[in-house]
Image: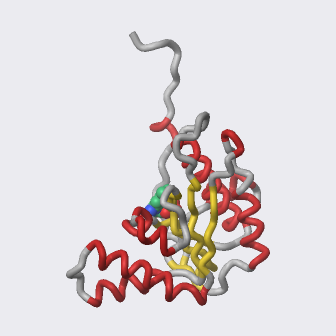
Amino acid sequence: MEALENLMSRRSPMKLAEPAPAREALDKAIAAAVRAPDHGKLKPWRFVVIDSDARAAFGDVLARCLKRQQPDCPEEMLAREREKAFRAPAIVVAVAKIQPQHPKIPEVEQLLAAGAATQNFWLALHAQGYGAMWKTGAAAYDAQVKHELGLAETDQIIGFLYVGSIAQPAMDAKRPEPDGFVGRWTQPAA
Ligand SMILES: Cc1cc2nc3c(=O)[nH]c(=O)nc-3n(C[C@H](O)[C@H](O)[C@H](O)COP(=O)(O)O)c2cc1C
């Protein structure tokens, strides 16, 4: 797919299904991810792949998180939370591996590099014909979830990327026009 067309056509599909991205496709997407801009060559990104067989355990992680946050929540809500793990045949957790108080590279720049890597990952999957949904929610900011996923306290989950084949494409949506987001600067404000 032509590069600009790939950028302009990326969407979050309504529904994902089997098959999950083939190993080779996933490897290519990770290879594209690690080419992201990276101030200080810190490589502040990690990708944790949750394959089909591990989804039930991941669903339990999500449900335990919800239960911690809402101890009285009904069993149906917990069941719905567990089901989220089955939105796609695989999940890739995108992580920013932050070096706190790095002498030269502010944390925000490390986070941005990991975000750029995640977008590269998504676009590379899209270019290979697969779909993804980038989700966060409370679980992304929960210390125990990080622990259960094998991450360090200083790591930041920047997205749960649900990945698979596109079973139902995104609905048509009006895309933002670029004009409203661009200004021209000519001189310092008084
Ligand atoms: C950091 C980040 C977190 C997001 N978290 C969620 C989320 O938890 N739930 C959700 O529905 N969309 C979330 N989104 C937005 C979707 O991934 C998606 O991009 C958006 O709905 C626009 O649809 P599109 O991808 O088809 O353009 C998130 C996006 C980003 C960048």
Q: Report whether 110 appears left or right of 173.
A: right
User: Which percent across, then down, holds residue 181?
Assistant: 48, 37
Q: Is residue 69 above or below residue 2?
A: below
Horizontal side, residue 162 vs residue 47: left or right? left
Q: Please indicate whether residue 25 sits to the left or right of residue 159 in the image.
A: right
Q: Quadrant of the C terminus?
A: top left
Q: Quadrant of the N terminus?
A: bottom right
Q: Quadrant of residue 126?
A: bottom right
Q: Residue extending furthest top?
A: 190
Residue at the image point whose x is 57% and y is 86% from the top: 54
Q: Position of residue 61 (x, y in %)?
A: 44, 80
> Could you say where residue 172 lies in the image, as x and y percent from the top left?
49, 65
Q: Which residue is painted at 79% across and 75% down in the image?
A: 24
Query: Relative to residue 73, is residue 126 depicted above or below?
Result: above
Nearer-the-camera pick, 180 or 114 = 114
**73 to 143, vertically: above or below:** below
Q: Residue at x 43, y 85 (%)?
A: 60
> Residue at position x 64%, y 55% from top?
117
Give left or right: position of 64 versus 48.
left
